[in-house]
Amino acid sequence: MASHFPNLFTDDNNVDSKGYTTNSKSIEFGPWHISYDVSCILPSMCSTKVVCERDDDQFCQFCIYCKELSIPHFPDMVFPKNILILEHNSGAKIEFNPLDALRRVSTRIEAIEVACAESWQESRPDAEKQKKSFDWTFSTDYKGTLSSNITVEETDETINFDLLKKKEQIIFYHDLTLFEDELHDHGISKLSVKIRVMPTYWYVLLRYFLRVDDVLVRSIETRMFHMLNTDYVMREFTAKEAKAEDINMPTILMKEADDVIPHLPLKEKHTDKLVVNSSNQN
Ligand SMILES: [Zn+2]
């Protein structure tokens, strides 16, 4: 199919000062510059002790996570530089990154009472830290990070899901994992973000999916939708949850988020309009 879109892709390999390689891809979509980085996993310990111990604002990724987060453990796999950024030429910016998502993991709530909780905790190495209760499912209601020049407004408008289902040419697509944990082989906790750019819109799905085997299934999703030539982004937040015993489907079919989420009862839903304040546009 002949594309009438100019070739606006950029593909870069970058190595930062600490030898951390990221692979970046980006595309221009109207006034939006959409880009993502793909990187490797967060190390499980400090990689540059000499530098980090100087305490002069230069830290490795691991030390940044330790300083910034109050949870005593991180998920098994965190991809610190897997970041999706949608930047408007007015300077407005929407970003999805694992650090901000993990900031929203509760350190107060009682851990879900499950049979595996104890063995899960015992399996973790630094046992003295275990005393501190935190949400070991890493559940997060993160909705993306917005710059201050984006106004959040309530709205009755909804995302046009019929349009999303229409078969059209996909111009740009990626599925980024921000973090993932297998809950000591008792299920999965995963946060991922997908970007899809189509001829007339872009669409983002940020999905937190939790399955504690035979206990609980939960999804917390944020969808963003922007139609070309409008000055706003629709943002729909949904939280769903069910006890495994209340879901009328075999455990084997609960493995894939796409298969089980449609069967979960809705707990919370709200839709906002993110208005881009482009006062410095011509
Ligand atoms: Zn360090």
Image (cartoon, rainbow, N blue to C red):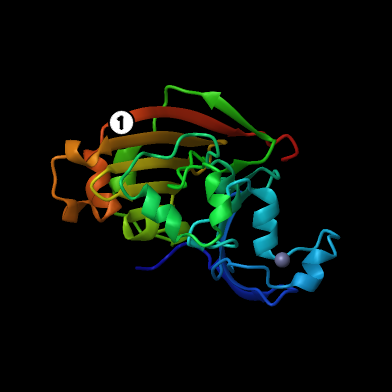
Label 1 secondary element: strand
Q: Is residue 281 left or right of residue 198?
A: right
Q: Is residue 153 above or below residue 172?
A: above
The residue lying at 51 percent from left, 42 percent from top is 134
Q: Residue 102 in the image: x percent, y percent? A: 55, 48
| Figure quadrant of the C terminus | top right
The residue lying at 52 percent from left, 62 percent from top is 125
Q: Is residue 62 left or right of residue 39?
A: right
Q: Residue 116 in the image: x percent, y percent? A: 33, 50
User: Does the Cβ of the disc 1 residue fall within 8 Å of ligand 1?
Assistant: no
Task: Name the amino acid type tagged 1.
Answer: Leu
Q: Quadrant of residue 126?
A: bottom right
Residue 197 seen: no
Counting every numbered tag in the picture gives: 1
Q: Residue 202 in the image: x percent, y percent? A: 46, 49
Residue under label 1, please give it: 266
Q: Is residue 160 above or below residue 42?
A: above
Q: Residue 237 in the image: x percent, y percent? A: 43, 34
43 vs 167, nearest the viewer: 43
The quarter of the rendering in which ligand 1 is drawn is bottom right
The residue lying at 40 percent from left, 55 percent from top is 120
Residue 1 seen: yes
| Figure quadrant of the N terminus | bottom left
Q: Quadrant of residue 56?
A: bottom right
Q: Is residue 97 left or right of residue 123?
A: right
* Callout 1 crowding tier (Cα within 10 Å): few <14, some 14–19, many ≥20: some
Q: Quadrant of residue 39?
A: bottom right
208 vs 112, nearest the viewer: 112
The residue lying at 45 percent from left, 43 percent from top is 139
